[in-house]
Image (tube, grey):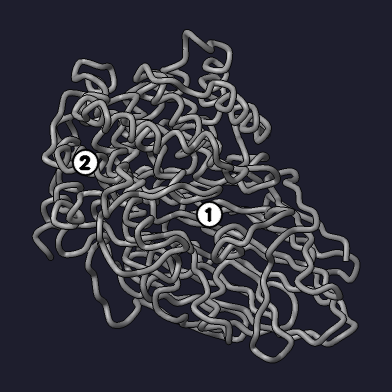
Amino acid sequence: MRAFDLAIRDNPLVTRKDMREALRQLCEPLIPYFSEGRTRLELGFTGSGCAAETAELEGFSRILWGLVPLAAGGGDSPLWDLVAQGIRNGTDPAHPEYWDAVRDYDQKLVEMAAMGFALALAPDRVWEPLSVPERQRFYDWLNQMNRRELHDCNWKFFNVMVNLGFKKAGLPYDAKRMNEHLDRIDAYYLSDGWYSDGPQAHCDYYVPFAIYFYGLLYSVWMKDEDPIRAGMYRERASVFAQAFIHWFAGDGSALPFGRSLTYRFAQSAFWSAMAYAEVEAFPMGVMKGLVLRNLRWWFRQPIFRADGTLTIGYAYPNLVMAENYNAPGSPYWALKAFLPLALPEQHPFWRAGELPLPRLPELSIQQAPRLVICRQEEKRHVVAFNAGHRSTNEHTHTSAKYEKFAYSNMFGFSVPRAEWGLSQGAFDSMLAMSEGDRMYRVKRTAEESEIRDHGVLYFRWKPWKDVEVRTWLIPGTPWHVRVHRIETGRYLDLADGGFALGLESLAERSRIAQPAAAESESRQARVSYPWGASGIRLLHGSGEAQLIYPNANTNVLHARTVIPTVTASLQPGTVGWLATAVYGEPGSDSSAWERPPRAEADGEALTVVWGGSGEERLRIEM
């Protein structure tokens, strides 16, 4: 194991001093990568949707999400001299490394938010070191924010952050424009604490690590000037916390779901912001545990280069799952989790003893994000069952990131590597369909969807205009059941994929050549390793179970995987039924495999029976 991996894995992350040390371990390896003028971080050569100069500015700005709380809490870093020099040069039109003018919808607008954050919390580091002309140039460059258009989503808060920075630093700010953006964000609110990330958009991590992160900062900084909105953010955050806590497992891991997963431990930034704003939806010790365990979990993953810099990816370096906007410096958005460093050592967050998760119910129905979350507490397993969305976007791998049937903190999810065949498509937790040419389609939107009694999810979707699928999804762990009614006007090959099981345990550096068990029969397939088991059974319909070995680097958690899958075919002009029971169990005990759900058809209806003693039943008219 590399020396850096050992150092950060060995950080106990118990005290404020430990967290400061973790930030040092994350930031100081960046020093050699500053450009000559200190305005950019030249971390690599992979491209993103913006120009290389802007991508390198992104790296420069995102380290502020960690350095600023450190400074606000009285800490120091050798990076501050580099940052001050970078601001001088980057905002000077006469300098070769000038950050340039800003356009509408420019990535630079995203990065300005971190500088507004710095003006608000650490003006002694980013403002006071500048001369009077340098201050004017810095202000003028940032103030372009108030003349530019922003995407209709969490981006609206970037303007708010810059104007709050101006206000906190005693500079002129555009209160009218800031309030227009705040009003627009209010329109994204759904219910039960949930926002969508824009009109008719998805609910994902942008709600906690963007909308609420900035909203909670606003609630502290503007509590006297705008007490109504500040109070609203705090109240909504407290309600949201009751749902969001279900996304975390007892070992510190959280659900991989949605886009921008390369921001990694930004997952816990919401809890950091709750502590900063002193909104105790849970005791401080619980929120402290959520932050510190999440950081510890991440630092056990192979997410670093040999020199200690972060890679693009999720649980390992992976460009296959990345977004078009992910540049080499993008992952440092994760430093938002270090906001508690702004709190003094005697603050209740630091004085509290770390507490485990409170006892949570095995099933949590979350209507606003259209999820049902199930827990196996003893296995530290969390699975989100997904009803799907009626609208979508053009971000990379949207279907894989938002439309799978299930998302697990232990099995992750997979994205396609290419367009041909089941191995390239990596269709875990999806029903994939082909016209016999091995070019598969999956669910991208739902024509209608709902969450019914007992958390049963129902959705209707159309991969082609003349193909309609109705899916009933019965949640549970370690078993869940899927029933598909498929009405087709064309020939179809079907593939219903179970959970993707890793062939290696990357975090533990385990390499085992052969699985503990692997079986593939006509109606069932299963594979198990010491770290878990995945399987599928065909309950109703014609088809065959098999093990699919996807292309490498398709899963966000495991570089190589196997997916138990049921395949079948349908003729044009027919209505077919396919019912499968999907099994996913972390650890070495897979005895529950012998107690599957079952399906009974009588010609008029299909009845699914599940539960240890068969006490639960769902009747579906045929």
Q: Please give the residue where the numbered disc 1 appears in the rendered image.
A: 258
Q: Which of the numbered marks, if any, corresponds to residue 83? A: 2
Q: Which of the numbered marks, if any, corresponds to residue 382? A: none
**Closest to the observer: 11 or 73?**
73
Would residue 408 be found to the left or right of residue 84 on screen? right
Q: Position of residue 180 (x, y in %)?
A: 62, 27
**Closest to the observer: 607 or 612?**
607
Inter-mark Cα distance, 1 to 2: 32 Å
Q: Name the residue: 75% across, 48% down.
A: 450
Residue furthest to the front in view is 94
Q: Name the residue: 63% across, 74% down.
A: 496
- Amino acid of disc 1: Gly
Q: Name the residue: 81% across, 65% down.
A: 606
Asked if residue 353 shows in the view, the reply is no
Label 1: how many Cα within 10 Å (few below 14, some 14–19, many 20+): some
Would residue 16 be found to the left or right of residue 553 on screen? left
Would residue 562 be found to the left or right of residue 566 on screen? left
Q: Position of residue 413 (x, y in %)?
A: 49, 64
Image depth: mark 1 or mark 2 in front = 2
